[in-house]
Image (spheres, rainbow, N blue to C red):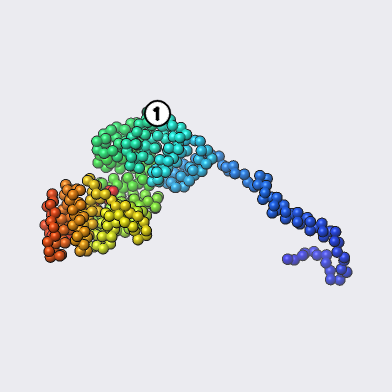
């Protein structure tokens, strides 16, 4: 450190110390240190920033809506939560949070948010409607219908509630599809130019196999907000149903770009490539889906199917076995077994492909067990029964000794042992 302009001189005579002045200076320094280290930290009310919010509630809500419109759903959710910390007594904020959570795939969180809104106002029609939508996504259609009916009792002109009701009725099965169509039309008559009503109408049209009209409805919803991944997924599914596979893959890619952590776009892309016989590409996307969601039996089963079709039979057995029997992945994740039930073609495909893969690696005892399960649980599914019989025939041919035959309702294929990719039915890209 340089002392510029110093009055010190080597030729000047040394002066005597003024001890009184030095003592005063030392005391002042000590007092300053005491203030800095003791007094100031102990008095935050005078020297620290207060805990009051730095911006008004309206600013949080505007920011959250802007993030939602931009497709940044997780960030929008965070800002809605910040808004709730500013004003935890406004049920409308919880409703907006719940809607964002549903579009992000957090159905349980959405249900909690909607119920928090109802704790604040039990007569809030929108809170009941969003709770119903979340309950439907959680697989509770009867609870969802009770909630949506309450929403409409409170506000018969709630277009969003009518739209949600249409989707709930579709998910209840074919018997309620006509009622779903009526609800979707009511929703559009009340609010013809909203994302939710276009989405609901598209969902009903898709369920009734009016895919071209469904495409137009989803396109209209995307024109309102093109940053919602779910809309691109639904549009892609309808393109697939129409056989427009390149457009379907593009829409799945759009959804993936908006939400890379979601395994569904990769799963649907895998199914689409498999439909056109491009199994190597299908396998790559199936692998990505499993990486994104390693606990899903469906995704492990789909990967096993793609391994089988690319002749990686040992890998196929491993993945299909996780899906059919459950187990623990190499990464330590638990996978629950997928249940074989009627009218679930994707699950049936996993089971009969497992039998075929087991036969290819010579595990014929297990092949017979899987074949018997298929015959017992879905005996009228001709495609599945035919394929498991093919697996049993392959074992018999390869072992050179009889394997107990199955009683079937379908004729086996004409070429025993030819368990190739031509045995399985055409693969649909839909879940």
**Residue in the picture at 16% in, 53% down:** 386
Give the class, few, some or many, for how many residues have Cα within 10 Å of label 1's Cα (few <14, many ≥20). some
Residue extending furthest toward the bottom: 11
Is residue 120 at least partly visible in the picture? yes
Specify whether 21 is left or right of 64: right
- Picture coordinates of residue 306, whole percent (x, y): 26, 58
Q: Nearer the viewer, residue 123 or 15?
A: 123
Residue at which label 1 appears: 154
State the image coordinates of residue 24 (x, y, percent, origin top left).
Answer: 82, 57
Where residue 154 sits in the image (x, y, percent)?
40, 28
Residue drawn where x is 40% and y is 50% of the image: 258
Q: Is residue 318 or residue 80 the one in the foreground?
A: 318
How many numbered circles does the render carry? 1
Q: Secondary structure at mark 1?
A: helix
Determine the residue positioned at 85% across, 61% down. 19
Q: Residue at x 40, y 40 (%)?
A: 111
Would you say 286 lies left or right of 101 here?
left
Examine the rendered structure and indicate whether residue 295 appears above or below residue 112. below
Image quarter where the N terminus lies is bottom right
Asked if one can make out residue 359 in the rendered structure from this viewpoint, the answer is no
**Residue placed most toward the observer, 329 or 168:** 329
- Using the rendered view, name the quadrant where residue 11 is placed: bottom right
Which quarter of the figure has residue 46? top right
Horizontal and vertical percent for residue 79? 49, 44
């Amino acid at each position: 450190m340089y002392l510029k302009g110093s009055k010190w001189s080597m030729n000047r005579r040394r002066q005597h110390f003024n001890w009184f002045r030095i003592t005063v200076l030392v005391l002042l320094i000590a007092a300053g240190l005491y203030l800095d280290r003791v007094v100031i930290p102990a008095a935050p009310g005078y020297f620290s920033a207060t805990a009051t919010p730095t911006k008004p509630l309206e600013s949080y809500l505007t920011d959250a809506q802007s993030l939602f419109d931009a497709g940044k759903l997780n960030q929008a959710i965070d800002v809605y939560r910040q808004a709730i910390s500013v004003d935890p007594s406004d049920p409308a904020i919880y409703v907006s949070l719940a809607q964002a959570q549903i579009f992000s795939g957090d159905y349980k969180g959405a249900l909690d948010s909607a119920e928090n809104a109802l704790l604040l106002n039990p007569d809030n029609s929108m809170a009941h409607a969003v709770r119903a939508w979340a309950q439907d996504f959680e697989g509770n259609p009867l609870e969802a219908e009770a909630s949506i009916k309450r929403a409409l009792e409170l506000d018969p002109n709630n277009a969003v509630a009518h739209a949600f009701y249409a989707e709930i009725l579709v998910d209840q099965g074919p018997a309620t599809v006509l009622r779903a169509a009526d609800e979707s039309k009511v929703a559009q008559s009340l609010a013809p130019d909203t994302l939710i009503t276009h989405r609901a109408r598209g969902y009903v049209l898709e369920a009734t196999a009016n895919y071209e009209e469904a495409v137009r409805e989803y396109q209209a919803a995307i024109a309102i907000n093109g940053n919602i991944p779910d809309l691109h997924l639904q549009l892609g599914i309808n393109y697939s149903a129409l056989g427009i596979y390149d457009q379907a893959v593009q829409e799945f890619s759009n959804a993936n770009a908006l939400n890379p952590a979601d395994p569904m776009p990769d799963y649907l892309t895998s199914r689409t490539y498999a439909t056109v016989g491009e199994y190597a590409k299908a396998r790559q996307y199936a692998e990505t889906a499993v990486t994104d969601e390693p606990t899903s039996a469906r995704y492990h089963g789909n990967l096993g199917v793609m391994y089988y079709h690319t002749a990686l039979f040992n890998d196929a057995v491993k993945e299909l076995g996780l899906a059919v029997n459950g187990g623990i992945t190499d990464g330590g994740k638990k996978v629950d077994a997928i249940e074989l039930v009627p009218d679930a073609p994707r699950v049936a495909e996993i089971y009969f492909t497992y039998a075929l893969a087991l036969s290819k690696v010579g595990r014929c005892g297990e092949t017979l067990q899987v074949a018997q399960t298929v015959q017992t649980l879905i005996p009228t599914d001709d495609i599945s029964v035919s394929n498991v019989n093919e697996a049993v025939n392959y074992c018999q041919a390869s072992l050179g000794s009889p394997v107990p035959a199955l009683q079937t309702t379908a004729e086996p294929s004409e070429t025993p042992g030819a368990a190739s990719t031509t045995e399985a039915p055409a693969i649909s890209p839909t879940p």
